[in-house]
Image: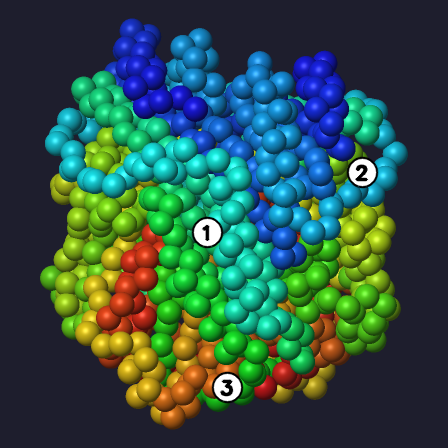
Amino acid sequence: MFDRLERAVERGRDLGASYVELRGEDGFLEFLQMDDGRVNALTQRIERGVAIRVLADGAWGFVSTGKLDGLDGAVKEAYSMAKAAARTRKDKISLANVKAYREVIELKVDRDPRDVPIEEKIAYMQDMTKAIRDYDERITAVTVKVRTASGSKYLVTSDGARIRSPIMLVWSYPWVTGKEKGQLSAARHEEASTHRGWEYMDEVATPQHMAEQVAKRVKLQLEGVPAKGGSFPCITGPRVIGVLAHEALGHLAEADLTINSSFNGKLGKVVASEGVNMIDDGTDPGNLGTSRYDDEGVPSSKVEIIRDSVLTELLSNREYSAKSDLRLTGNARAESYLHPPIIRMRNTYFETGDHSFEELFEGIDFGYYLADFRGGQAQMNASFQVGIQEAYEIVDGEMGGPVRDLSISGIATDSLFKIEGISKEEFPYELGRCGKGQEAFVASGGPDIRFGKGGITFGGQG
Amino acid sequence: MTDERTLLELCRHIVASGERMGATAVEAQASSTSEVESNIELSQISSVNRKDLDGIAIRTFVGQRMGSAFTNIPTKKTVDEALSLALKAAKASTPDEDWTSLPKPAKYPAIKGLWHDSVADCDSARVVEFAEEYMSRAIGAEPGLMPAYGGSGAGTEHSAYANSNGIEHAERGTTAYVFLAAIAQIESGVTPAIGSYDIRRDLKFDLDWVVEDIVSMIRLCKRTSEGVSGSHTVIFHPDAYQQMLFYTLIQSIRGDNVARGKSMIADKIGEAIASKLVTIVDDGTIPEGVATSMADDEGVPRRRTPIIEKGVLRSFIWDSYWASKMGVESTGNASRSMRQGQVELSPSTVVVEPGKRDIKDLVSEVKHGYLVRDVQGAHSSNPESGDFSIVGNPAVLIEDGEMKGAVHGLMVSGNVFDLMKQVVDVAKTPLVLQGLIGPEIVCEDMKVIARE
């Protein structure tokens, strides 16, 4: 693959392009879906393809193709696409300089998912379905999805980069419905690894673990009281503060979005209450969003987005590093050869503080503890919304009963100033996917954090 | 690009090979898409992209065991390899006692206007021109308007389907669009991003309309208003309620969810579930719809399916598997994820029947209420219960019949089945969106929560 890509890069140079990048992929991918025990999809595919990105006259041209024999033509086409884009540009795109790395990265897993028999994968899903149904008799429907990927991706650029990286994924996702007296509730759970093979399903995302996580939330929803609408103090657990770090704040710190967002012009300024630190770390060993290099061949790094309450750094790629004079952080990621790389988060989290878990509850007459979410969304004006699938009332400083169908919202840049306490206890990461026109596997998290009244608005039915 | 006749040949080959290799039933769906698109970033065209993608999805059955496979390389050699993978998967799978048969041949509707040579011949320079014109006209029409992202595109899709029951079908279509999302600086930061697009089968974009749409909303959102919590009239723009319906009502009319006990309205056929003003049709044959085609992804003819007529629930949507299981006919709503292989139910174009009154007249009658143009969080609704709690962004305050300004962080909570009964008026001019054609709807007594 390397030779083929290098020849095509040469072709791009000959045409006069200022930068040529080819990303090749060769992978074995699987998708399985089981609905109430019925196999609805059992698809294996071998996929090969190449993404070609060319910078010419200060604009990008991009071509994605599955035809590996026609790369010269694809490069030529990408070049002409860039020329067509460039005609209207007032300022020309340039790229930050980067050291050209040449490396073959190996990943050793105990059980490559492509070698695990289909029968075993089906048995995994059957066991999970049974464990979920056995958890509570009110559970009426169970869908289980599993994805795996195993292969290699190749990067060759006209700047001299030549990197082969592993493609690895094991992903498990149950969606469960419960019913009682005409009331329906639903919950989902998700676990994934990009660094371990099928052994992750044997040891971490076991059928029993997945069943416990998802079924307990359906049960709590069925038994919960309706949420109240309005503004209340609340404590966000690690999974919910993680999604706020990602959705409500992380996206604003992606340099391609920052200029149009509420973080514009705030670098170096206080953006949060005292003691707030928020990080995106692409170097955390084994974490879901970690890789040694990004899809432009830039080493991943740890980015201190908020340090001591001050907006300190933004996530960048080579284009925005040059455009906005930012440190090159290695956050250019592409879902596959079908997409160009864009700025994405990796593992985003709030750092721990100095409160005990109990101290966070002190003085709250009525509020909510938010344990898990079902989807979140943010906008450029820092407005966010997160659906909550596991929550509890806080009454007189104590954890109360479960609450159903709660949704939270706020203006993130205002909410940051309503943080009143941060737990000192370590936290688990929430593992999931981000959609910014293309999919990226990301982790997010943080300790329990308390927000004062007015920081978060609650939309409930009660 | 591979034309539809070549794709159909490949599908026929897969079916014949699959039967020879011992499959009880085989189906193949192939598509070849080619798209040129331009991207807008920071008020300039940043890139032009071309994606030429082929895909062949195969499902095989050995008895009642199913296995599927995909390849992106349209040659007989690679589809034979994919076929082997699908058969291997089928043999390893578990039997599905409810599976009976793949669909059988039927007559397809004649639909005009799905293909336009002008789109197929559109080159990168022309695609750039569309985006550039939209962007420059919007900037010129409103001081401070900043294009944040957007673009334009023109593409073709050739597709084919064949199965071992004798269905052989091929068709082609074109799609083109212009899209822009813009913001403006305000004292507290920036306005919400306002998006407006025109998506169609030809290149006759209504740039006057999209420019006016985006500019008028940015102008409104430059002014900020305060919301008031309580029970208020809310006018939902089709962009907003399309998302809300998709994650709630639409999930409830899917035949698989009806059969699996996941729909709150599974036993409500023939009953009033909405205001008499509400008529909703799933129309897979409407020429303006970009989801329109002659056949669904199982080769079953698309059709027009009334879902709600004057408030009364009339039908659900079905594919061949769930229809067979429940003893009804497929409504031509099978949707295949080509790469992942699963065949699921999805609406084609949802058409909300327009009312009789102009939107301006409807706004003028609101003493205190809100226009919700777009929403955040529709996807976190409870698809089973229909409960939702979304943020209107932008949401615009209406006082004494006048639109005042944007309210930040305004939440609207409720249940979709209550909302359908709270519809008190429907505007007369439908907007053509991707997946929905409909006008604004007016709902009374919606629970609104304003930020403190």
The answer to whether mark 2 and mark 3 are in CB contact below 8 A is no
Figure check: A125 above or below A107: below
Residue B443 in percent (x, y) is at 31, 78
Front residue of this view, candidates A223 and B278: B278
Q: Which residue is mark 2?
A: A298
Kindly tell me whether residue A459 is visible in this rendering.
no
**Which quarter of the image is occupied by the N terminus of chain B?**
top left
The kind of secondary structure element at disc 1 is strand
Spot the residue most to the top: B20
* Label 3 sits on residue: B227
Label at residue A47: none
Mark 1 belongs to which amino acid?
Val
Is the C-beta separation of discs 2 and 1 under 8 Å? no
State whether residue A74 appears in this view.
Answer: yes
Tag 3, which chain?
B
Q: Nearer the viewer, mark 2 or mark 1?
A: 1
Residue positioned 70% across, 62% down in the render: A259
Residue at image mark 1: B178
Dot 1 crowding, Cα within 10 Å, few <14, some 14–19, many 20+: many
x, y (%) of residue A146? 50, 36
Q: Secondary structure at mark 3?
A: loop
**CA separation, marks 3 and 1?**
33 Å
